[in-house]
Amino acid sequence: MASTTPTETPPAPPAASRRAASTGRVGDKVFLGLSRGSGILLLAIMASIAVFLGYRAALAISENEGDFLTTFDWNPAGDPPVFGIAVLLFGTVVSSIIAMAIAVPVAVGIALFISHYAPRRIAAPLAYVVDLLAAVPSIIYGIWGALFLVPYLGGLNLWLDEYLGWTYVFDKTEVGVARSLFTVGILLAIMILPIVTSVSREVFLQVPRMNEEAALALGATRWEVIRMSVLPFGRSGVISASMLGLGRALGETMAVATVLSPSFVISLHILDPGGGTFAQNIAAKFDEADQFGRDALIASGLVLFVLTLLVNGAARLIIARRKEYSGANA
Amino acid sequence: MAKRIDISGLSAFYGSHKAIEDISMTVEPRSVTAFIGPSGCGKSTFLRTLNRMHEVTPGGRVEGKVMLDDENLYAREVDPVAVRRTVGMVFQRPNPFPTMSIFDNVAAGLRLNGSYKKTELNAVVERSLRGANLWNEVKDRLNKPGSGLSGGQQQRLCIARAIAVEPDVLLMDEPCSALDPISTLAIEDLIGELKERFTIVIVTHNMQQAARVSDRTAFFNLSAVGQPGRLIEIDETERIFSNPSVQATEDYISGRFG
Ligand SMILES: Nc1ncnc2c1ncn2[C@@H]1O[C@H](COP(=O)(O)OP(=O)(O)O)[C@@H](O)[C@H]1O
Ligand SMILES: [Mg+2]
């Protein structure tokens, strides 16, 4: 390191700088090799995972007597084996939609409060607490959901049933505890809140001062500044943040498995217990499944993977379409 | 409607740091007043006290009085948001709303003030863009983003946005310092036209520019770094540049410091 050269010895700098230059070149080579090697390794690992999973999934699907996409059942051990992902797909998508519908507006609100409304004294601790929520392991959320959320959501469920029951969606047709997709959605919302909040907050804090002053100087109120400058600038960031959260919601396993009472039905009465998600189904069945059963679960896992890819692709499209108008080229 | 600004005993602070001290002057309506002075002497700070933008900086605080005709902008009951709607501002770096189209940029201020019919908006947007000498260049792409224009066009777009709401006063903080000479000339011409309708205050570090565009010039200075800036003198631009009454002004203008 050139900086370790003592300041008292004037002739040292040339030697030091030559040394720095030569190690720099070797460093370049080492770094190039290292990064190229790990890149290739990563691709190889991913390809082998994909081949392995695809092969096992194909084995299972070729033996399946039911339609893999439309069957409302999961019985790979039966004779003949019948299993399908319809219920899992439905449950995964519905619980994630509920989670997003609750978490994104709340997260954006909290993020705006931290970045633009709260005095520093409050903003910093609040941001810290929200970040802390992200560190709670999901099994803890699951236990909390099962022991607290499920019993205490009973009242909310009854209220929703009574006043919004006419919407069909909130019509509760079965009595019993709230081990429903709705409860799962709320739990997932709480779990993804921190990540969506902290990413959104960072984006809102990066809005250039001059963008906000443009609005202020026109006589915009604080809320109007947020509407004219902050939200448009943060839009693509909020979408990315939501996708991160959605990715977590789609794949969440333990918390869902702990709260949901699974059943192979599709019902839009989201307050009724039952339903299932990809990850929850895999977690619940993997241990007791035989080889074939595990291959079937792998096939369902691949569908989840594709679903996640599609969601991410859609998000990228949304962001790219607005690129011309994004703050990036200001 | 152009209004007279009467400033008396004005000081501005950043936290405990006093940036400008005890400034009193009058800015005449329908004229261009230029602020010159070495960098750091508080020109921007002073300008931003005139539309109550100074107080949006954390720790920003103002003492003194700014009368817009017969209304004190710093009176207790005055809403700073309302002040900024009547005192427009153009910044050093062009700052159109990057996510808005050219049309929406110009219409932004109007939309803040209430709802307008599409035909009214169209008329105001055209008038403002014409007023900013930008109409011919953008009339075929009003729906394109404002951030796609050149720097000089963006700055004229910002001027169009500011004059669309018919402010009483237009403040400009070194509006040409980020622009090339041709765009600078375009803006200077524009300022000459705008002063028929508005009271204009322009900060500039370019002495020729002050001489070219302004009717009156105010010279600011600070006695030492860290000391608050003060108004040294304000006079007809011609006088300031030919025969200023304070030696420091002459030194500054003749390039002896600053
Ligand atoms: N946001 C700020 N926070 C603290 N001090 C500031 C801020 N902006 C400007 N100042 C200080 O106020 C003084 C005047 O600055 P400014 O008004 O920008 O001068 P000018 O525009 O004449 O160059 C300077 O000493 C500067 O350091
Ligand atoms: Mg300045």
Image (spheres, rainbow, N blue to C red):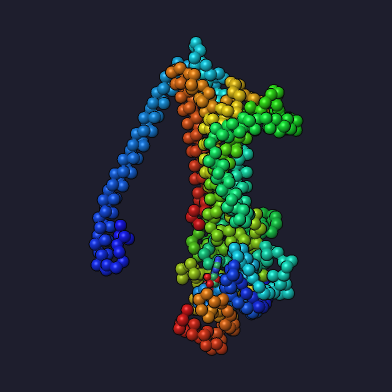
Measuring 58% from the left and 55% from the top, which residue is drawn there?
A229
Residue B96: image location, x then y, percent? 55, 59
- Extreme residue toward the top, this view: A79
* Looking at the image, residue A249 lies above or below residue A240: above
* Looking at the image, residue A53 lies above or below residue B48: above
Measuring 59% from the left and 50% from the top, which residue is drawn there?
A125
Foreground: B65 or A323? B65
Residue B98: image location, x then y, percent? 54, 55
Residue A326: image location, x then y, percent? 52, 51
Foreground: B173 or A25? A25
Q: Quadrant of residue B157?
A: bottom right
Measuring 51% from the left and 12% from the top, which residue is drawn there?
A78
* Looking at the image, residue A63 lies above or below residue A304: above
Q: Quadrant of residue A187?
A: top right
Foreground: A38 or A311? A38
Give the image quadrant in which the ligand numbered 1 is located: bottom right
* Looking at the image, residue A52 lies above or below residue B111: above
Q: Quadrant of residue A222?
A: bottom right
- Extreme residue toward the right, this view: A162
Res A246 visible? yes
Picture mark count: 0
Res B142 visible? no
Of the 4 image quadrants, the one containing the N terminus of chain B is: bottom right
Residue B57: image location, x then y, percent? 59, 64
Measuring 50% from the left and 30% from the top, which residue is drawn there?
A304
Left or right: B114, with A23 as reference point: right
